Amino acid sequence: MSERKTHDVLSMEWIKLELIRTAYATRGGLFAKMDPRVVLLWYLLLGGAPWFTHNITVLAILFGLGVISVIAARVGPLVLGLFVLSLVVEVINVFVVAWFVGGDVGTLLALSELSLKLGAVSLASMAAFVSLDPEKLSSALLALKAPVMLAFSVSYGFRILPILIDEFSIVMEGYQLRGAPAKAPGFLGWRSVSRWGKHAVLAFYPIFLNVATSVRTTVEALETRGLNHSVTHPEGRRLRLSHLQTGTLDWIVVAVTFVGIVFAFWVGAVAPIHR
Amino acid sequence: MTTTVRTGELRGNSFNGKDLSTPQKLMIFVLSMSLFGLSNILVEVIPEFTIGPVEIALAYFVFIPLVLAALFNPFWVALGAPLGEIIFTDLLLGDFSGIGEIEGFIQMFLAIYIAGSLIRNPLSKAQVAFGAIMIVVIDKFLSAIVDLSKVWFGLEDAEFVEGLPESMLLIEVIGFGVDILLSGIVFGVIPALWLVPKLYGRIEPLMGMQPRQPGKPIQGSTPGIGITVALVFVLGAASAVFAFLEAWGADFGAAEWEWLDTYGPAILLVPAAIFVVLLAGVFVFAGKQRKQP
């Protein structure tokens, strides 16, 4: 932990590092040890359950399960921070809308139901996808017979993202440095905003060409190694996916989650809170 | 022309034929996914202003999928761009909302594919501008209809203030106007008119393809016109279904408990069954795709 003593918390560099860390899931944690196929199944369980109820008791318990799994998955501060921020904004929004409509506690409950539901789903997806590094996610998708394109693009996307952000910020900084700064910020700083927007668009021209080149290189390299053949041919698939194995831990986690969900619905039936 | 000198599987093998090779389709798909995903991360950074109930926010950088759809085969661009949005922003930042994502994916796919197919000549300014507006119109029109009908169905049961439907309509119309102005024109038409001619003839050789010739059919086959039309209709219907799945959670009324009582909990299996059927359809479709050379 010694390298993280600096307190440059909200710098661009930190965000980039956090994204890399998120994409590669090096924090460890419960779900990182599990079989990726089982993690996806687990996600379907916990991420799907909130959609089948409108009962606030059930949703609250599911939300609690989500919080526990996020702690178990050791989600990083950036992703967690963004989630908490959006949750706070959501709560403020709910209050404003309730006040705007002139509602009472009932309206508040009705509005908070959706936030709870979406929150529970996001918590589950955070726990699952933060723990799956791109390699694991794409082999899980392949094992579940998803189209090759999808499996490949997920793993490629996760890998290329930090590089893309890096490239873009370099080009963008170049434009910012070369251009003259806005003379006066103007009303609500519109001059700086429009300058930023203009540079963002301009910066995309070299980025288009760069990405086109790198995409071609990647795809050609993959073709040379026989990507399409190796994943469509049954023998190749078997070899490629042979490292996937489910263990006791996987099924314990799934069973515990399943029991938790059943428990939530049982409590919900005993003490329901509807809007 | 370097493409004629270096002939290989990926280098201009297909430029007298009409089809793209599978790796070239993959390239277009991945290119559109990466670029649109990157632009979505930027959009996340831009603050949003809210004046009363009207939100002034940039939805996305429309010019990115538009430029790609104008220069390359729009089918693969339309497939890649919304997936990039899901992978880069929603999945990675933990903002993944399950079923709701499918609705967004379908809307965006339809918008880009239709707008891209409308552009016959990438160097025609009018066509590119029209395409940019069409992406926003189709995408936002679909979601505005969905929003309005949610409120409308919610209103049947809930006791609401007089004039609320009218004000909701007004808010939707204003929001629609803001989106067309900001996403469609400022970050759509204007950058696209600058970028398309600049990239035309430059980016295609980098990917081993021929620049699109006005009036000639676009390079690369899409899976059969019949299947595509059918797919578009199914996807449109599915988009509505998924939207209403959300609406049952989102509306203010007490309607859903009544329908749950009248039909029993088994009714919940209907959306689940539709989902499974759609998923099976996608896999079958993907399997067929793969068999084609």
Image (cartoon, helix red, strand yellow):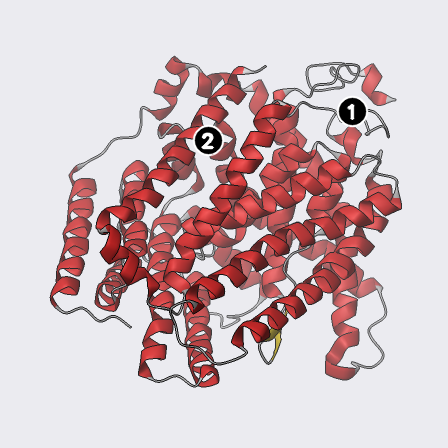
Along the line of sight, the residue nearer the viewer: B51 or B162: B162
Q: Which residue is drawn at 56% across and 16% down?
A: B292
- Assign a secondary structure to mark 2: helix
Q: Is residue A135 above or below residue B252?
A: above
Mark 2: give few (<14), some (14-19) or many (20+) Cα within 10 Å: some
Along the line of sight, the residue nearer the viewer: B253 or B242: B253
Q: Quadrant of the N terminus of chain B?
A: top right
Q: In which quarter of the image is the C terminus of chain B?
A: top right
Q: Do labels 2 and 1 share a chain?
A: yes
Q: Is residue A174 visible?
A: no
- Assign a secondary structure to mark 1: loop
Tag 2 residue: B282
Q: Is residue A192 visible?
A: yes
- Residue B173, given in percent of the width and then of the height, sits at 65, 67
- Residue A209, given in percent of the width and then of the height, sits at 75, 40
Question: Marks 2 and 1, Cα distance to the nearest angstrom?
Answer: 27 Å
- Residue B125, given in percent of the width and then of the height, sits at 88, 46
Mark 1 belongs to which subunit?
Answer: B
Report whether B48 appears left or right of A26: right
Report whether A5 appears left or right of A51: right
Q: Residue at x 81, y 20 (%)?
A: B3
Along the line of sight, the residue nearer the viewer: B117 or B6: B117
**What numbered label is drawn on residue B217?**
1
The three-letter amino acid code for the residue at tag 2 is Val
